[in-house]
Image: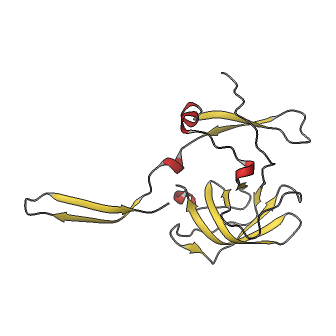
Amino acid sequence: SAEYDIGRIASPAVIGQTVNALPPHSPHLIDARNRLVVDLAHSGLLLPLSPVSALVWAGGEILSYANAEQTGAARYELSDLRRGLFGTGNKVQGHVAGEDFVLLAPDNLMLLENDSLLALQNFQIFAQGIGDETPVATPITIAGLATLPRSPVHGRGQVDQQGTLRLSWIRLPR
């Protein structure tokens, strides 16, 4: 196995854990009823309180929020959620408290080109914080969910005069 240094991120990742179990909700509607409460790893990390297009990853689901309220030194309550974004609609079910949480912001992410993704479908990522003497490794599998087409909706079937079944549908927008 070979090691490749694919680069460094500009700023520290904003990470933490969910405090509450987020109930299921349709990925097609804004979730104005439920709130996601998160504890960040420490009080030096900040979430945007009025995001323009903030995305977060919580327990395998990518979502965005319209409002955030800081309720403690490192605790935030996110509301008006858009759920199941970028191919993660199947993850809107079954959230539990204590899931990993990551702010997906340009400064703390690295975009890999598609060729890189294919070459590195299964790999280990190493991270080293200020207080870490050695890097910590974790295995990562890239599923490519965001590159899959959206699910079809509004399916229709019609049989023409020759008896041929014609199927049609539309795809949800990204």
**Where 58 falls versus 122 (above or below)?**
below
Q: Quadrant of residue 162?
A: bottom left
On the image, the x and y values in percent for residue 50 come to 74, 70
Furthest residue toward left:
162
The tally of labels here is 0
Colour pattern of the rendering = secondary structure
> Is 85 left or right of 52, judged from the image as shown?
left
> Is 132 left or right of 114, judged from the image as shown?
right
Furthest residue toward top:
1
At 65% from the left and 39% from the top, the residue drawn is: 140
At 53% from the left and 50% from the top, the residue drawn is: 146
On the image, the x and y values in percent for residue 34 come to 65, 74
Seen from the viewer's position, the closer of residues 78 and 173 is 173
On the image, the x and y values in percent for residue 151 come to 42, 58
Furthest residue toward bottom:
33
> Is 152 left or right of 117, judged from the image as shown?
left
**Where 58 falls versus 69 (above or below)?**
above
At 57% from the left and 58% from the top, the residue drawn is: 91
Q: Quadrant of residue 158?
A: bottom left
**Where 149 falls versus 73 (above or below)?**
above
On the image, the x and y values in percent for residue 174 come to 50, 60
The quarter of the rendered structure image containing the N terminus is: top right
